Amino acid sequence: MFKHRNRLGLAAAAAVLAAAAAGAVATVAHAAPEAPAAVPTNLWARVSGAGTLIAGSGVTGVTHTVTGQYEVAFAVNVRSCAYVATTVNAHSQALQVFTAGGHLSVNGVYVETKNQGGGLTDGPFNLVVDCGSPGWSYAVVGYKANLVRHSAGVVSLTNLGTGRYDVTFPAPVAGCAFLATVGDPGHALVFNPNGVYTGSGPNPRTVYIETKNQGGGLSAGIPFHLAVICPNAVRTRIAVVNANGIMNRGSALTSSFLGTTGNYAVISVVRVSSCATVATRGSVNTAVPFDPATVEITPGPAFNTTGIQVRGLLFFGGNLANEAFHAAIVC
């Protein structure tokens, strides 16, 4: 068993009292007590396939236990939050990522990367933790179509049938991005690789979800984490993009385009190397996300762009495909 650990310290500033002088009278400066470290606005990590922390916010370390298994530790307890992640393209076939609560501590998020045959495979990924800050909402749904936890307010879950759900929030979310990851609602394992897809629900407060198996069929009993990220979220840019590359909705000063088949770019006003991008295959409206696909992050053509690569499931050949998606750049 191999273990790699990296640490990213949180900056803490100590305030000092300045010496002041008035006429012939001088006052002596005394150092004020050290201020506690501030909790970062956003919690995120970019991790290499080898388990090296590339960049992050609020991260204290990454542990890579065995092939395809990682734990990202944060400076705060994240057990009550939701965890969404996206793999970074590094293989001939798109990898998939699954999340759960930390196996090592309540401050950790457990991550598995697998090939589409279900085998654990080392792969780089981006991880974002949603704890319900302003502009963020979340819901975590269990194996029995049960709402395990959610952000503040009254949130309801409606099981519409096999692998189909409506998640309703207390305020409108129609202008937001819907990111979802298959993930255990506790801190166990997700054994079977499957997919989760998003779209708009029947009213502005509702998100539509589908869970599907690797053959593209609707399947029940697949747990997932849903993060709803809105344009007013601090240090975050969102983009909900049509299959043709034109942005349907998103943050100000953010745009997108389709380069070649299945290869998109999201353009923002931030240096994306200092952020984590997550994305989910999903409809831009109330249409069903009929064609299941994988979504991975790729390098963008400029410092303020991030690439999004969409492929059909390996079961159907794994070819590049033009499909709509939801993305968030979290800094």
Image: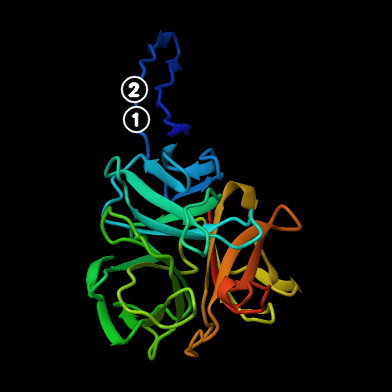
Q: Residues within 10 Å of mark 2 (few under 14, many from 20)?
A: few
In the drawing, does residue 64 fall left or right of residue 169? right
Asked which colour scheme the image uses, the reply is rainbow
In the drawing, does residue 329 fall left or right of residue 181? right
> For the residues marked 2 and 1, what is the alpha-carbon distance in whole angstroms?
8 Å
Q: Where does the image place residue 126, in percent across and percent down from the top left?
A: 52, 53
Can you tell which quarter of the image residue 299 is in? bottom right
Residue 35, numbered label: 1
Q: Where does the image place residue 94, in percent across and percent down from the top left?
A: 59, 63
Q: Mark 2 highlights which residue? A: 32
Q: Are discs 2 and 1 less than 8 Å apart at CB?
A: yes
Q: Where does the image place residue 183, in percent across and percent down from the top left?
A: 36, 62
- Residue type of the residue flagged with mark 2: Ala
**Residue drawn at 65 percent across, 66 percent down:** 309
Q: Where does the image place residue 10, in percent across and percent down from the top left?
A: 43, 34
**Residue drawn at 54 percent across, 83 percent down:** 284
Q: Is residue 229 above or below residue 11?
A: below
